[in-house]
Amino acid sequence: MQIPSSSKYIHTVLIAILLVISFLVPAFAQRTLKVTDSQDQHIFTGKEIQYLEDKAGSYSFKDVLSPASSDRFINSVTNTPQNYNLESTYWFRIRILHNPDSRKNWVLEFFDQTIDDITAYLPDGKGGYTTRRMGDQLPFRNREYSHKNFELNIANTAAYDGTYYFRVKSHQIADTIIVLRSVNRFIQYALDEYFIFGIFYGMVLVFSFYNLMMYLAVRQIQYLYYVLYNLCVGLFEMCIDGVAYQYLWPNAPEWNQYAYGIALYGVSIFALQFTRTLLYTHKKAPVLDRVIIWIMGLRTLFFLICLFFNTDWFSYKFVELVPLAVAFYTGIYIYRQGYHPARFFVLGYTFLSIGFIHKLLLMLHVEGLNFGVVTYYSLSICFVLEMIFLSFAIGDKVRVLKTKKEKAQRQIIRQMHLNEKLKDSLNVRLEAQVEERTREVLEQSAIIEAQNEELTEVNALLQQQKEEILQMNLLLEKDNEVLHTSVVKVTQARVMSAEVDFEEFSKIYPDNDSCFRFLASMKWGNDAASGHYECRKCGHDHYFHGHSPHSRRCAKCDYDESVISHTIFQNTRIPINKAFYMVFLMYTTKGKISSHKLSEILSIRQGTCWAYASRIKKVMQDRRKEIAASRSGEGWSLLVLDHSLEPA
């Protein structure tokens, strides 16, 4: 039977497709690693490790083993598989061809000790699986090996091709680096690694202790910031390496979720504070100093949000590039201004920047940057170099300060020598001037002594004249007293008996006090010795000064008698000196002056003058006999006292 040409063509194409598929299937199939004693360790990379993303996190191990899920596993396109989507759960699988003839014991190891949860499904060679669970959210004592990484013993007692499954879930991006190692190689590697850790953390402690002693010695705050910065770097590295979980909090796995974030916050804050104090940014770069303060405030705000709202945000370590870049730029800026200690600061931050950028590029899966162990510990190496150069920067700053101090001391000593010379020259000049002045003083002293003798004689004469003047003053004082008494008596007699105008009358009684004093002398005498006080209520003859001016209060019954009570001026509402003058006018005119005239003279309403004049006329009518029989000098004062009035 002859096949048509078209059928032959289709048949040929199908055969070609099958041949291509037969060649491509091995190329896309997962590679199997064979256990062999010739190789102590092997890292699964590329097609040797496949992964499946479970976005809902709902797959069970049975679901993963199903043909539908098995076909969805894809080869890793990078040497270091990662959980890019933190919300998803990732399944990884590797294949190992077991060799029972191997004389070595083997373990599977996960390099990244920050993975939260790893569930391993290990084939038993009989079609079944055993389950092991690991992760930094579990107590450290649950591990098969007391090591910072996660290790699993594998059975190698039978020849079979086993597929290992691993369910990985972590709150931060984790490197799923799976390594097959012999136990001997693992022990050697672990001892070497812990030895390196001892050197690194020992250097951190040595640097910290040395700078703490320097701070206690010189009390410069940059030493304390540097100590805190080193301790935070050490704590961050211990968290990243898993050493902190092993030795610091093995029974508190919850600390693994955010302890590294706290340490990283301390690294940023103390690095910026160290930058400010070491480089004097508040003086040399005020604008940058304010920028650093703002960045510390924003970094603190981000830290508090992560700590109290979502600790998963601590995994965004790239934010530390901002403080690092600002500190680096500040060092360059200050160095360009001529501050030499900044050169070591810039050099140290150059290495640290290289380490951070290298880690960032590795996270972005830039190929060609993986150099094995050096790559894994690159940031730690950069931290060590930075610590060394920052110590040099502090020492250089101390050296600069010491140089400035010595220069200042030399200037002070030089100035002291100049001052000493100036003092000597001044002393010589002063001694010459003192000698010259002393001669002048001695010459003047002789003249002054002669003048003093003349002054002594003059003083004796003046003393004699002074005594004579004092005797004359005593005689004049006695004459003045007699004359003053005579004038007062004459004036009062004239007022009592003659007509004077209100202006002249006011000179004798110018105010209320003079009027009250006159009334008091009429009622009780001039003083306590010559007075004749007698209480109107109890008859007691001792008194105190009362509440109103010139009043008297009985020392026994406490009766207070005012100076105008029992006088013609009691209850009057016109000024007392005008009332005095009205009595004087009524007396001198014998009551014939009109109220209109009184109103004109005293500037008081006519009605008031009429009422008070009527009162005075009545007293004059009642005492006409006394007035007629009065002696010279008594005059109108006979009208003042009025014994018929009640006490005020």
Image (cartoon, rainbow, N blue to C red):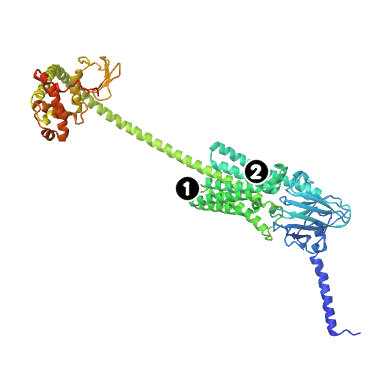
Quarter holding the N terminus is bottom right
Above-or-below relation of 401 to 624:
below
SS assignment at label 2: helix
**In the drawing, what numbered circle is on residue 203?**
2
User: Residue at point 78% right, 55% down?
Assistant: 166
Q: Which residue is the site of mark 1?
A: 283
Q: Quadrant of residue 476?
A: top left
For marks 1 and 2, the one nearer the N-term is 2
- The crowding category of the residue bearing disc 1, from other C-alpha atoms within 10 Å (few below 14, some 14 to 19, many at least 20), is few
x and y, in percent, of residue 210 in the image: 60, 39
State the residue in front, 578 or 507: 578
Could you tell me the amino acid type at mark 1?
A: Lys
Say which of 466 and 429 sits in front. 466
Residue 110 visible to the viewer: no
- The residue under the point 65% across, 58% down is 361
Image disc number at residue 126: none
